[in-house]
C-alpha cells in the first residue's frame, strides 16, 4: 500500500505560479513512475506530467510544456510540480499518482492516487 499526501494548491491570478508537492509513504519500493493528472468539473481526468523514478525521464502534456516542470526527490519519495505562467484553463483538481507498471499516459494505468488538491486560476 502507498499513501500520497498532496499540498500546495490554492488560488492565484493568471500569470502566477504555484508549486505542488506530493509525499509518498508506505510500500513504495515498486514505484516505476509518478505523475500528475488534473480534472476540471464535467471533464475527463487529463494527463499533465510524469517522471520515471530510475532514469528521471519526464513527459508532459502539450498544453503545459514550457510552463510546468515535474521533479522528484528520491530520498524523500516526494514529487513536485512547478507551475508557472498559469492560465484560467489550468483550473482543476490536481492529483498525484504512482505507476508500478503500464503506460504513463493513461490514468487507468496508475495504482495509487492522492486525494487531489484544488488549483484555481483567476482571470
Image: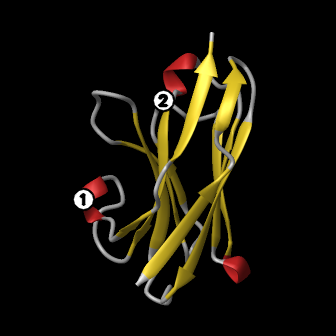
**Up-down relation of residue 50 to residue 85 (above or below):** below
Give x and y (percent) for residue 86: 65, 25
Q: Is residue 8 left or right of residue 35?
A: right
Percent across and percent down for residue 75 are 72, 82
Whole-percent x and y of residue 34?
49, 65
Q: Which element carries disc 2, helix, strand or loop?
A: loop
Image: 109 above or below 26: above
Rendering coords of residue 61 (x, y %): 45, 39
Where disc 1 sits, the SS reads: helix
The residue identified by callout 2 is 63
Residue at figure coordinates x 45%, y 79% from the top left: 2
Q: Is residue 95 above or below residue 12?
A: below
Real-space Cα separation, disc 1 to disc 2, in angstroms: 20 Å
Tell me the colour scheme of the image: secondary structure
Q: How would you rate the neighbour count of disc 2 (Cα within 10 Å): few for under 14, some for 14-19, many for 20 or more?
A: few
Residue 73 as seen in the image, left or right of residue 29: right
Q: Residue 72 occupies which quadrant of the picture?
A: bottom right
Task: Kindly identify which residue carries mark 1.
Answer: 108
Q: Nearer the viewer, mark 1 or mark 2?
A: 1
Going 57% across and 81% down the picture, which residue do you hit? 25
Which of these two is toward me, 31 or 8?
8
Q: Residue at x 66, y 59 (%)?
A: 71
> How many numbered discs sit on the rendered protein?
2
Residue, far top: 123
> Image point 46% across, 56% down: which residue?
115
Amino acid at each position: 500500500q502507498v499513501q500520497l499526501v498532496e499540498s500546495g494548491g490554492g488560488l492565484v491570478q493568471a500569470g502566477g505560479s504555484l508549486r505542488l508537492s506530493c509525499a509518498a509513504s508506505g510500500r513504495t519500493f515498486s514505484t516505476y513512475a509518478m505523475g500528475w493528472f488534473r480534472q476540471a468539473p464535467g471533464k475527463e481526468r487529463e494527463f499533465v506530467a510524469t517522471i520515471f523514478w530510475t532514469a528521471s525521464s519526464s513527459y508532459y502534456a502539450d498544453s503545459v510544456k514550457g510552463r510546468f516542470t515535474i521533479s522528484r526527490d528520491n530520498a524523500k519519495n516526494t514529487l513536485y510540480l512547478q507551475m508557472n505562467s498559469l492560465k484560467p484553463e489550468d483550473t482543476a483538481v490536481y492529483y498525484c499518482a504512482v505507476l508500478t507498471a503500464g503506460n504513463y499516459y493513461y490514468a487507468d494505468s496508475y495504482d495509487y492516487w492522492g486525494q487531489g488538491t484544488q488549483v484555481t486560476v483567476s482571470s
